[in-house]
Image (cartoon, rainbow, N blue to C red):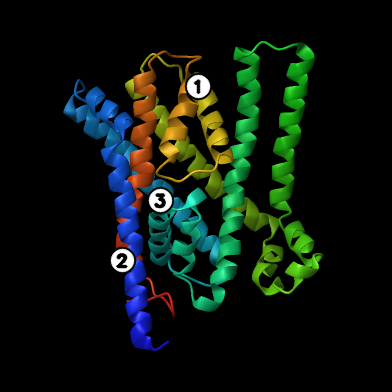
Amino acid sequence: MTSKYKKVLATFIKIAVVAFAFWFIYRKLTSHNDLMEFVKLLASIPIQQIWLVLGTVFLLMLFNWGLEAVKWKELIARVEQISLWRAVESVFCGLTWAVFTPNRLGEYGGRVFFLSPKRRIIGVVAMTVGNIGQLVLTNVFGAITVCIFVYRFIPLEPILQAATCGIALVFALFFIVFYFNIKWLNGLLLSIKFTRKYQKFYAVLARYKKKELLKILLFCLARYAIFTTQYIIMFLWLIPDLKMMDILLLVPILFFVQSTLPSLDLLDIGIRSVTALFFFKYITDQNTAVVACIASIWLINIIIPAILGSYFVFKLNFFGNTQRN
């Protein structure tokens, strides 16, 4: 394929990606009743208060994805050195790709196309390590809070309560041990004849030391804290009668349940709302406010970053090094 046709094809792909993303976003926003409920709730709130609260949640979103960019830069350091701004570009570009692909798979492509071609597959493996770190925290905190939730709201025989806690403990420990020994996965893949020939792509798994994995996990923890803070702010704002400890109990459960369900980012709002209503019915009957809270955070954390990332899609070069100017 000549350079001219490569350029035309690359431009077509970029336009297609952005067009798909904006079409999906437009369709979802125009048919989203939950967002309409959120707008109605805002009608009775002073405009200064709206700007203060939503502005704070928006700034937390930027800080969250900024931390993800730093984490991505650290993860990819063993594969290719990139600047912090390049990491920011790749993260937001990935969010645009993720918005219309199942289980955010497009996010991998959006990020690794900012790497040189020979390192892109290895970049996918490195990104997976970071996602596993985030999943570890989601599962650990989720398992702990599920135990507390069952104890508080679901009457069980003492032996069943103990069994639930025991299973949750083993579940949490498994993910912690697995994460800090991610090199075991490298050994497992080497033991399989079919995957052995692809060793050069996943060998990076054996290079991560426990100290580096801990550093990545701390970035994941900071992001987890930001996500949780956003929910706390919105719930306490829209439903002032809620108790802080109840929110801290239920939000990790929401993260935990959502992480186990396959979805599109744009369809994920329905799953988030149903999940939130199921658990929050134990502490409040203000269903409209609960759904409005979930919808607003979805808009700020998913839709707005996807729109911002569309600019960076046009900076990709699919057939060579990413433009550095």
Which one is in front, 238 or 211? Answer: 238
Q: Is residue 290 above or below residue 216?
A: above
Q: Which residue is mark 1?
A: 278
- Which residue type does callout 1 highlight? Phe
Looking at the image, can residue 193 be seen? yes
The crowd level at tag 2 (other Cα within 10 Å; few <14, some 14-19, many 20+) is some
Mark 3 vs mark 2: which is more N-terminal? 2
Which one is in front, 53 or 261? Answer: 261
Residue drawn at x 40%, y 51% as measured from the top left: 99
The crowd level at tag 1 (other Cα within 10 Å; few <14, some 14-19, many 20+) is few
- Which residue type does callout 2 highlight? Ile
State the separation of the CA atoms marked 3 and 1: 25 Å
Q: Are marks 2 and 1 in contact (CB under 8 Å)?
A: no
Q: Are marks 3 and 1 in contact (CB under 8 Å)?
A: no
Q: Secondary structure at mark 2?
A: helix
Q: Secondary structure at mark 3?
A: loop
- x and y percent of residue 174 in the render? 74, 42
Mark 3 vs mark 1: which is more N-terminal? 3
State the separation of the CA atoms marked 2 and 1: 40 Å
